[in-house]
Image (tube, rainbow, N blue to C red):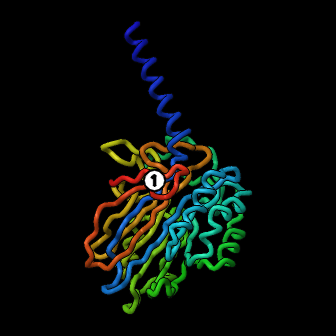
């Protein structure tokens, strides 16, 4: 019994320590990921795209607001926001403080479920169940229209069910987006059709990277699709990866870049927030990504991550 007691005590202590780290340290360990993707037309100059997603902003999250605002120092050519900005009915001012400097740069966005509805307490075990078996539970309506108005007034383009031609940093872009597939609000028929042949980049934008949506973008000839929603799994195990993706996407693509089909690249952001009712991250720090897009024929090196934690950009750099 003494041996068993020691085992239980040790296991309990390890569990408490792990939870304390996941809830108190890692979920505030803001991280900048650098990824280079060969997706541009031949002869095009490099394009720097900042991908931000899943802020899940609460009014009092000042550290997150300061860190996101400081991303403007990266001087991206384009900002892409893939949704889930809000987690509270009064969070619009906080989200705008975070995004404020970036709104002066070219940007496009779509919304996710947690722009439309607030979070609700849920049994964490639900996320280990197949998504098709889960009954959708909506919280209170959130002021997404106010957030949209502020973003568009500053010049960002809402690409929800729209196709847009944009001139950015000397490049011609074709961008199309969808409403949130996680809520089955996506209507791909509104943007369906082959992409233009005279662009440097054909970019798709969606919140949840559902395979049915990715297949449609790939069939129409898109070069790159950016998505969020998965939180990178939020809880990852070394050597195993994400436990779940909270959508139909396979676990191996829960975070980072991958190839979808013969031509298209996919980048899924692990995002910068969590639900206030599940405020933990493990082996999956909150992140934004600076994507350097280069011509398709250019060789691509390793992906790198800068773990910032309030330090100047570039501190703590390592390669994964």
Tell me where residue 280 appears, x and y as whole percent.
53, 42
Q: On the image, numbered disc 1 is attached to which residue?
A: 315
Tally of numbered discs: 1
The answer to whether residue 220 is visible is no
Residue 72 lies left or right of residue 97; in this view the side is left
Residue drawn at (74%, 57%), measured in percent from left and top? 90
Residue drawn at (72%, 69%), measured in percent from left and top? 146
In the current view of this chain or complex, which residue is farthest to the top? 2
Tell me where residue 53 appears, x and y as whole percent.
53, 62
Residue 272 lies left or right of residue 232; in this view the side is right
Q: Quadrant of residue 221?
A: bottom left
Residue drawn at (33%, 54%), measured in percent from left and top? 319
Compared to residue 174, the image places residue 95 above or below, namely: above
Tell me where residue 58 appears, x and y as whole percent.
67, 52
In the current view of this chain or complex, which residue is farthest to the right? 90
Compared to residue 116, the image places residue 19 above or below, namely: above
Q: Quadrant of the C terminus?
A: bottom left
Residue drawn at (36%, 78%), measured in percent from left and top? 223
278 or 282: which is nearer to us?
Answer: 282
Compared to residue 249, the image places residue 177 above or below, namely: below
The answer to whether residue 221 is visible is yes
Q: Quadrant of residue 81?
A: bottom right
In the current view of this chain or complex, which residue is farthest to the bottom? 198
SS for callout 1? loop
Tell me where residue 286 appears, x and y as whole percent.
50, 52
Residue density around tag 1, few if under 14, some if 14–19, many if 20 or more, within 10 Å: few
Q: Quadrant of the N terminus?
A: top left
């Amino acid at each position: 019994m003494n041996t068993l007691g020691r085992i239980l005590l040790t296991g309990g202590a390890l569990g408490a320590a792990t939870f304390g780290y996941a809830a108190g340290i890692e979920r505030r360990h803001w991280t900048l990921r650098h990824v280079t993707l060969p997706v541009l037309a031949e002869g095009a100059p490099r394009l720097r795209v900042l991908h931000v997603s899943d802020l899940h902003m609460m009014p009092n999250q000042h550290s997150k607001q300061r860190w996101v605002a400081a991303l403007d120092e990266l001087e991206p050519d384009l900002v892409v926001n893939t949704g889930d900005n809000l987690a509270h009915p009064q969070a619009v001012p906080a989200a705008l403080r975070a995004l404020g400097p970036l709104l002066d740069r070219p940007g496009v966005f779509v919304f996710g479920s947690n722009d439309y509805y607030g979070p609700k307490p849920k049994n964490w075990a639900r996320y280990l169940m197949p998504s098709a078996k889960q009954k959708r539970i909506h919280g209170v309506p959130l002021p997404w229209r106010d957030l949209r108005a502020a973003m568009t007034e500053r010049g960002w383009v809402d690409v929800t069910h729209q196709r847009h031609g944009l001139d950015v940093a000397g490049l011609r872009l074709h961008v199309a987006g969808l409403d949130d597939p996680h809520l089955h609000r996506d209507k791909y028929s509104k943007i369906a059709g082959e992409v233009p042949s005279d662009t440097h980049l054909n970019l798709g934008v969606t919140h949840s990277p559902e395979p049915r949506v990715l297949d449609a973008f790939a069939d129409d000839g898109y070069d790159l699709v950016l998505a969020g929603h998965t939180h990178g799994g939020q809880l990852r195990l070394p050597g195993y990866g994400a436990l779940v993706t909270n959508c139909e996407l396979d676990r191996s693509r829960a975070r980072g870049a991958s190839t979808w089909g013969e031509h298209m690249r996919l980048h899924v952001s692990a995002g910068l927030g969590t639900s206030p009712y599940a405020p933990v991250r493990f082996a999956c720090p909150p992140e934004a990504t600076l994507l350097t897009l280069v011509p398709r024929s250019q060789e691509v090196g390793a992906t790198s991550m800068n773990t910032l934690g309030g330090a100047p950009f570039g501190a703590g750099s390592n390669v994964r």
